[in-house]
Amino acid sequence: MRNTQGIGGNNRLEHGLATTRNADGRHADSGCGSPQGIRLILDLNSDGLQEYLSSVVDDFNPAASTDLGIRGYADKLTRLGRTIAAVSDSPDTRRIAGILAGYFNSPEQGFSYVSAFHVRRPFRRMHIGRMLMDKAMEISRAAGFRSLRLKVDKSNDAGISFYEWYGFTKIGENAKQFEMDFNLIGNLNDGM
Ligand SMILES: CC(C)(COP(=O)(O)OP(=O)(O)OC[C@H]1O[C@@H](n2cnc3c(N)ncnc32)[C@H](O)[C@@H]1OP(=O)(O)O)[C@@H](O)C(=O)NCCC(=O)NCCS
């Protein structure tokens, strides 16, 4: 598979924003400091995950699992994977601000896999996505994975921008999606 890093054309530098990257290309400030009033909880139950996904279904579609339906998808993820939820302490907002759900159960295959990643619109651009991803990296590294992978629709500019900003590289593509990879070996600055 060819390395397509750089395609997507929507990163911080191109927007003229200041940024600092490490020698490995990863942004240098990841994981340092957390969005105010947001804390992480691990392993939502199936009802909690289903409730969240149902409430954002018009905004986000867990594409890989539409055939299962939201109930089946939430059941599968709860059974085989893990869900990280960002919870807001603010009483006037919905309790769960965002989620990252994925599979961290087969270190022998070398990579963990993000299946669902979403932050509610009012909470975006507060680095909650970064906080969730940092935790996924921490879990992956502790479990012995060498990298974390995901697929993103080619039309998803926000997703691609986030992943490139975070330090993912494109390792493959089909007509609709890019496959992206974050190499955990040598990237030790997440989860601070
Ligand atoms: C992708 C998503 C999870 C990002 O969540 P977020 O909490 O807003 O992301 P962060 O605040 O941590 O963003 C970190 C950096 O990523 C980049 N980024 C994030 N969203 C961006 C956007 N819409 N446009 C351009 N860059 C963006 C920025 O560089 C940002 O840093 P900055 O705000 O300091 O410039 C969110 O946009 C979302 O839920 N999208 C809909 C669901 C989705 O498409 N998920 C991915 C499926 S593969």
Image (cartoon, grey):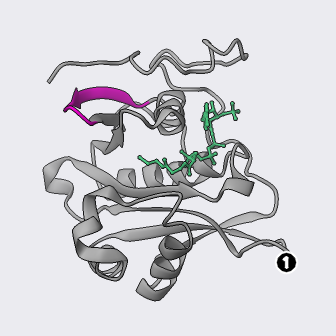
In the image, 104 versus 51, the foreground residue is: 51
**10 Å crowding of disc 1: few (<14), some (14-19), many (20+):** few
Q: Residue 115: name its quadrant.
A: bottom left
Q: Where on the picture, by quarter, is residue 85?
A: bottom right
Which amino acid is tagged 1?
Pro
- How many numbered tags mark residues here? 1
| Ligand 1 quadrant in view | top right
Q: Image check: 34 left or right of 191?
A: right
Residue 107 against residue 174 in the figure, above or below = below
Q: Does residue 140 appear anywhere in the picture? A: yes
Residue at x 85%, y 75% (from the top left corner): 92
Q: Which residue position holds label 1? A: 91
Disc 1 element: loop
Q: Is residue 187 left or right of residue 14?
A: left
Magenta stretch in the rendered image? 168-176
Q: Position of residue 67 (x, y in %)?
A: 22, 69
Taking the image as shown, residue 18 lies to the left or right of residue 155, namely: right
Residue 131 as seen in the image, left or right of residue 153: right
On the question of residue 192 being in view, the answer is no
* Residue shown at 19% from the left, 61% from the top: 106
